[in-house]
Amino acid sequence: QVQLVESGGGTVQAGRSLRLSCAASGHTFTGIAMGWFRQAPGKEREFVAGVGWRGNVTYYEDSVKGRFTISRDNSKNTVALQMNSLKVEDTAVYYCAASYYGTYARRIYEYDYWGQGTQVTVSS
């Protein structure tokens, strides 16, 4: 079992930045790919960013490339999502997830554990 707890959500104006964090516990953090997903009201949950277990491979959904950066610290069992140049359309609940599937996991069914989510609201 892996427990995931997100933090760092909030309300910001468009163009500003937020940093989300996810703390993992309950299982060794190494060997597990990590990802961030989001779900806006009335929409399906979608992949945002992922990072391989070593931290040297990252991949992103097209709309956030160049604005969001995912990173992990295996010594602290944490993964972060730095979100810059936020847009109104980035408004959603953001979820941290853990995958045994491996690097490049981006589908919901490829992730085994999920956090409860943290709300990000971007105002115009």
Image: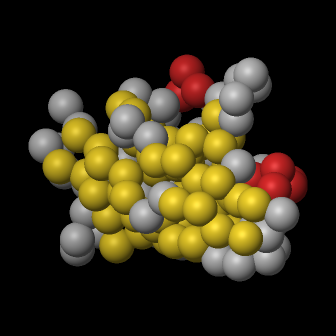
Q: Which residue is at the far left?
A: 26
Q: Is residue 8 above or below residue 32?
A: below
Decide which of 21, 42 is in the foreground and name it.
42
* Residue 92 in view of the camera: yes
Q: Quadrant of residue 122?
A: bottom right
Numbered-mark total? 0
Q: Quadrant of residue 123?
A: bottom right
Q: Quadrant of the C terminus?
A: bottom right
x, y (%) of residue 60? 73, 56
Q: Is residue 91 above or below residue 69?
A: above
The residue sitting at 74% across, 22% down in the picture is 42
Decide which of 112, 94 is in the foreground and name it.
94
Q: Is residue 101 left or right of residue 5?
A: right
Q: Quadrant of residue 23?
A: bottom left
x, y (%) of residue 87? 82, 62
Q: Quadrant of the N terminus?
A: top left
The residue sitting at 13% across, 43% down in the picture is 26
Decide which of 113, 38 is in the foreground and name it.
38
x, y (%) of residue 118? 46, 47
Q: Is residue 62 left or right of residue 77?
A: right
What is the basis of the colouring in this image? secondary structure
* Residue 84 in view of the camera: no
The residue sitting at 23% across, 40% down in the picture is 3
The residue sitting at 75% across, 25% down in the picture is 43
